[in-house]
Amino acid sequence: MAILHSAAAVLAVFVHQGRPMGVNDIALALKMPKSSVSRLLRQMADAGLLMRDAESLAYSPADMMVALGRFVLEHQPVIRRIESELSEAVALNGHTGFISVLDSTLHQVVVLRVLHGTQMLRIVTQAGKRNSAVSTSTGRALLARLSDDRVAAAFGETLGMDASPQSRGLPWLLRSLAGVRRTGCAVALDEAFAHVGSVSCAVGEPSSGQSWAFCLSFPSVLAQEKSFVEDLSRQLVRSARRLGRSIDDPHWQ
């Protein structure tokens, strides 16, 4: 059984990195001796799980693994795929994860799933909870998928009437959404909740027209270190790109 666990760990590295990798890279990621990793990769290649480029000597998943991945995607509802991706991010970082959708008014996001982290200080919101779409990273990630005209029609008469950040008005919101479209993710710090930060991405299913946002929430004090938010953003964007391309989401093609 030990070799099965090791092989699964190798495949998980490819999932997280999303690129061909050499023996040194995988040994570093798994914190295993290079000789052990080299032997394991050869065995996985012999079994048809990996293939090795003759020139670069880098390994990547073999055709059988790609076909298996397609089979899983075709038989797994989108929200389960999102939950699977997010659960890996929660396990890796220890922060609480959420999956949310916009309500019919576009003014609120509704929490569908809560994936509890392992950090001592956890951000807890129950499934079914509604929050301002403008004030949350999940809301802005979802609003960014809409046209500016539709956002303006939904919010033009109401922005500026409530507390910050709504008081910053429609021009601020449209600029913020343009930034989300450019980077692929939304960031909120001390907005809907004091001392709470979050990073979110969104994916959508063309056939149904439904979109979902997923995020990691954390104590906002951690954002004082610039690389913290940047690292989380890169992780979630990679996950969103994988998910989006697997369901033919045009926003991620």
Image (cartoon, rainbow, N blue to C red):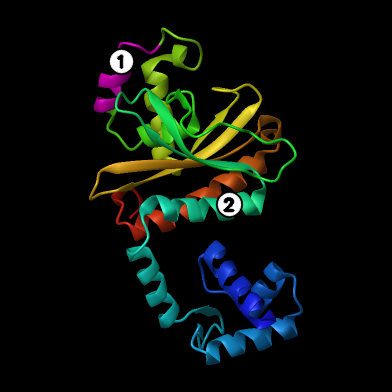
* On screen, residue 119 above or below 140: below
Would you call the spot at circle 2 few (<14 residues within 10 Å), some (14-19), or many (20 or more)? many
Say if residue 122 shows up in the picture. yes
Residue 190, percent from left and from top = 60, 24
Give the SS element for disc 1.
Answer: loop
Give the residue drawn at x 42%, y 26%: 133
- Based on the picture, tell me whether residue 158 belongs to the magenta stretch: yes
Q: Quadrant of residue 197?
A: top right
**Residue with the mark numbered 1:** 156
Measured in 3D between alpha carbons, the distance from the residue under mark 1 to the one under mark 2, in whole angstroms, is: 36 Å
* Residue bounds of the magenta highlight: 149-159
Question: Quadrant of residue 173 in the image?
Answer: top left
Quarter holding the N terminus?
Answer: bottom right
In this picture, residue 202 sits left or right of residue 207: right
Label 1, residues with CA under 10 Å away: few <14, some 14-19, many ≥20: some
Query: Mark 2 falls on what kind of element?
Result: helix
Q: Earlier in the sequence, mark 1 or mark 2?
A: 2
Q: Position of residue 224 (x, y in %)?
A: 70, 33
Q: Which residue is mark 2?
A: 89
User: Callout 1, which amino acid?
Assistant: Gly
Q: Residue at x 25, y 20 (%)?
A: 153
Residue under the image location 43 percent in, 56 percent down? 81
Q: Position of residue 219 (x, y in %)?
A: 68, 32
Q: Amino acid at mark 2?
A: Ala
Q: Residue furthest bottom?
A: 46
> Viewed as shown, does residue 173 lie left or right of 149?
right
Q: Quadrant of the C terminus?
A: bottom left
x and y, in percent, of residue 67 in the image: 37, 76
